[in-house]
Amino acid sequence: MSIKEKINLSKLPSHIAIIMDGNGRWAKQQGEERIFGHENGVKAVRDTVEGAAEIGVKYLTLYAFSTENWNRPQEEVAALMKLLVHTINIETETLNKNNIRLQAIGDLESLPKDCYDELQEAISNTKNNSSMTLVLALSYSSRWEIINAVRQIARGVEDKKLSAAEINESTIQNYLCTYNIPDPELMIRTSGEHRISNFLLWQLAYSELYFTDKFWPDFRKEDLFEAILDYQTRERRFGKTSEQLIS
Ligand code: IPE
Ligand code: IPE
Ligand code: MG
């Protein structure tokens, strides 16, 4: 039985989020520049997207560039942005062929103009696709997102559109970039780092976390399936007791 066949399709996470980490270390291992790792990371993206779509995952969010990543050496940032424009341009056709819709979360206006334009074009060209939504987190950080949400809610209170007492979980949810996306049931991070690095802090409240030592350029759909199998062995209690879940 292949790993894929072992997956229980009736217990599939509908949203998987991935911190794609380890490109730089992967490149260093081969005696190459960091950007070589980013370039090879694209293959992993392609295979993972394909794998997720094959088994029927509804949302796949990929952390591609964080707010803090702007602080990297300027030539690495420039090369990453170039790679992004190029990849989005090339992959739009495949996304359409596979009925995948592209979305993006983050401070998109901070992206270089060619990157922003390419992204908006791909989002618009794939907007009617319905089998899976691929969400790219770009110039994204959760604290940025939460500050943004708080500002908008505060403005609503100032303008007397809502009262402070009315603010609840769904008010906050509605002002996050992911307002139209369910919370991830599963979050995967590659490269052996066990941290969240400012990713989906609100949305990951009850996600199952899965860590693998593989560097991102080595990650393939079988690794995704492995993570899903592991997820399917977990008991998600949401604060309740095991006994309550059975009855
Ligand atoms: C992840 O790989 C890609 C981005 C953050 C853009 P890294 O570039 O962080 O690789 P390491 O963690 O330094 O090996
Ligand atoms: C997190 O990886 C961001 C992305 C994968 C885009 P980093 O490599 O930037 O995270 P830290 O700095 O190791 O926490
Ligand atoms: Mg890293």
Image: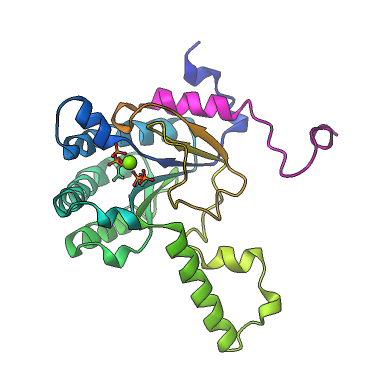
Quadrant assignment, res 24: top left
Residue 33 spot, x, y in % from top left? 14, 36
Given residues 181 and 168, the one toward you in this image is 168
The residue nearer to you, when weighing 42 against 30, is 30
- Dividing the picture into quadrants, the one containing residue 43 is top left
Q: Residue at x 55, y 41 (%)?
A: 14
Name the spot of residue 131 as percent of width and height, x first: 45, 42
* Magenta-span inclusion, residue 234: yes
- Residue sitting at 49 percent across and 52 percent down? 200
Residue shown at 29%/53% (left/top)?
69
- The image shows residue 118 at horizontal and vertical percentages of 22, 57
If the picture is divided into quarters, which one holds ligand 3? top left
Q: Specify the farthest residue to the top.
A: 1
The magenta-colored residue range is 221-247
Q: Does the magenta run of residues contain 48?
A: no
At a point 38% along the width and 57% down the height, the residue shown is 140
Please count the marks in the image.
0
**215 and 232: which is toward the camera:** 215
**Relative image position of residue 228 (x, y in whole percent):** 52, 29
Q: Quick check: 177 left or right of 24?
A: right
Name the quadrant of the C terminus. top right
Apparent side of residue 121 relative to residue 49 in the rendered image (left or right): left
Judging from the image, the colouring scheme is: rainbow
Towards the viewer: 238 or 181 = 238
